[in-house]
Image (cartoon, coloured by chain):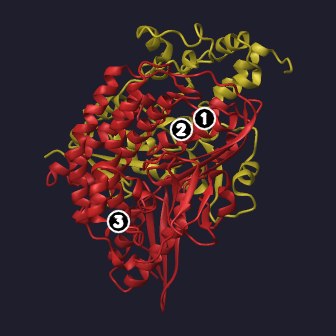
Amino acid sequence: MKNVYLPITVDHIARVEGKGGVEIVLGEDGVKEVKLNIIEGPRFFEAITLGKKLDEALAVYPRICSFCSAAHKLTAVEAAEKAVGFIPREEIQALREVLYIGDMIESHALHLYLLVLPDYLGYSGPLHMVEEYKKEVGIALELKNLGSWMMDELGSRAIHQENVVLGGFGKLPNRGVLERMKERLGEALSKAEYTFDLFVRLEQYEEVEGPITHLAVKPREDVYGIYGDYIKATDGSEFPSEEYKKYIKEFVVEHSFAKHSHYHGRPFMVGAISRVVNNASLLYGRAKELYERHKELLRPTNPFANNMAQALELVYFIERGMDLIDEALAKWPFKARDEVVIKDGFGVSTTEAPRGLLVYALEVKDGRVAYADIITPTAFNLAMMEEHVRMMAERHYNDDPERLKLLAEMVVRAYDPCISCSVHVARL
Amino acid sequence: MEEKIKIGFYALTSCYGCQLQLAMMDELLQLISNAEIVCWYMLDGKSLEDEPVDIAFIEGSVSTEEEVELVKKIRENAKIVVAVGSCAVQGGVQSWEQDKNLEDLWKTVYGDGKVKFQPKMAEPVSKYIKVDYNIYGCPPEKRDFLYALGTFLVGSWPEDIDYPVCLECRLNGNPCVLLERGEPCLGPITRAGCDARCPAYGIACIGCRGAIDYDVAWFDSLARVFREKGLTREEILERMRIFNAHNPKLEEMVEKIFGGESQ
């Protein structure tokens, strides 16, 4: 019997966060079992915020995840605003989306360059790439810095933003900052395109090729985007966000502090590629051109296409961010926030976090949280991820265990789970 | 050539924000050329968890039985242990709910589902091992890392912060969120170092850097101000507990203001 350890990267999951591992159990006839063990302690976010004041709960929710804290903050705040029956002004919504885009740019840049690329270049981590790949590391830092600067300016900081409040923002940046933001986005476009060209060339392993059902938010407006009130699936169906529980079933598995999810009784995928395959017709600008040229690679049948889809989104969201800043500036100057009357009610917000569909359902009663349900992208993805790791393992179980572990890790990483974990390969 | 200082970065139960903050620093590339990174799973696949290091940075709260063993092992392997961020130092926001037990919390989130690992109520690292230095914040500021790491790497010892957010806030000339707007700002009891980041945005401090040590966190005085503004004992405790759930002074000092009256 052999036991080997290997760290791999896995997502931030609500009340799980971080530490997880892949366990591939082999027997005489090949792969017996594949399990993604999610072993980091539970944090019970839904339980600890029950009965708490709404604004304090909203300060705590983003702490679920650092890589996409802005996504959590904005989704939680929207669910709360829906619950109390408040709709933010268009210009406020536009700036919230710009903040969300900051998160998207930072998260995608970190994932693609620091977590994915080292595998393809044969390094154990990005810090070893610095000498040989100066240009790539430089671009990574530049994109990452742009995203975190946007979150600093609009959210108060790049991790755990406090500046988003019920009714709007605590404080708005001044006009000059928004103009500079648009300029910097414009300057970054060529870097994003370079990233896309780079990821077009990377292998998408055919071992995991096969049908996948993808779920994504149907954008509220008629452009590719982040917010929406309906969920779309690649099986052609569509349902209102409030009915997510009817279509997506969550259940506990014994090897994971994160719950698994099924759609119509089957694993499914969410993420950048899920957005692209569901909403490609709503892309515009440079990203639309790139999509048309490379759509055979941006396909729904391979989880590795998610890396490329993220690179495409870097291009898209940079252009989209510039347009949203223009929309906000057209209404300038305006108030940072409106008064929100906290009434009783129930609200569901579904948005597209960097890693895919994020659901917040909140019930507010007497100004306090009476019910909370949060489902994060990785919780949605875990079951599908397990299936893809199994497909990879079935083809490579006779290989050197180091090779198998690396390939298993790469499958998991393609889903953009952002944390380190370990892989056990147990040969029985 | 002189041997490089060996560094390990370890994660318990957390959001990985402390590591992310450190990883996002452009200065990191200059700093780590003076160090050898033995363990940092978030950034390096060749990490070794059970190896001797000079400085161990620990992020996250102790939230499983497995993590209790891990922190003990890290302590044995390290010359200096640094607790990083509000989870490691104060038990984090996951410690917020102290009135329900583990079983209640479990049932709310997982129902009757069972998992093969052993969860426990979140606790700070110092509950299980000796911690030599703390880096505060949720997340810590980049300059917290720059100062601590830079100081360690030149062979010196960084100083602690013993003054409140209010000090930085007044120096920056922000309007007072507590006195002028009447919002329950925790600046007066919270450790400085963030340059009063949230009050600068007109947002009341929620205390993410934790209460100041050295017996200068006046929970009672602030509770009196909050009470005058109409907050109940429970509301005050709830707010102060978000990042201070394990502080032994908190309840007793707030109690002084309410003097055992029932609310």
Please state which of residues A258 and A234 is positioned toward the viewer in this rendering.
A234
What colour is chain B? yellow
Horizontally, is A304 left or right of A69 in the view?
left
Q: Residues within 10 Å of mark 3 (few under 14, many from 20)?
A: many
The residue that appears at 51% across and 69% down in the rendered structure is A213
Give the Cα distance between marks 2 and 3: 30 Å
Q: What chain does badge 3 belong to? A: A
Residue A148 appears anywhere in the view: yes
Which chain identifier belongs to the red chain?
A
How far is the residue under mark 1 from the one under mark 3? 36 Å
Return the x and y of residue B63 as percentages of the image width and height.
59, 49
Mark 3, residue position: A298
A142 horizontally vs B104: left or right: left
- Which of marks 3 and 2 precedes in the sequence? 2
Contact between labelled residues 3 and 2, with CB atoms less than 8 Å apart: no
Task: Give the left or right position of residue A195, taking residue B163 as reference.
Answer: left
Which chain is home to disc 2? A
Front of the two marks 2 and 3 = 3
Query: Are callouts 2 and 1 both on one chain?
Result: yes
Considering only order in the chain, which callout, 1 or 2, is on the residue closer to the N terminus?
1
The kind of secondary structure element at disc 2 is helix
Q: Quadrant of residue B48?
A: bottom left
Amino acid bearing label 1? Leu
Q: Which residue is mark 1?
A: A58
Q: Which residue is mark 2?
A: A73
> How many numbered markers are drawn?
3
Q: Say above or below: B46 vs B134.
A: below
- Relative to residue A91, is residue A63 depicted above or below? below
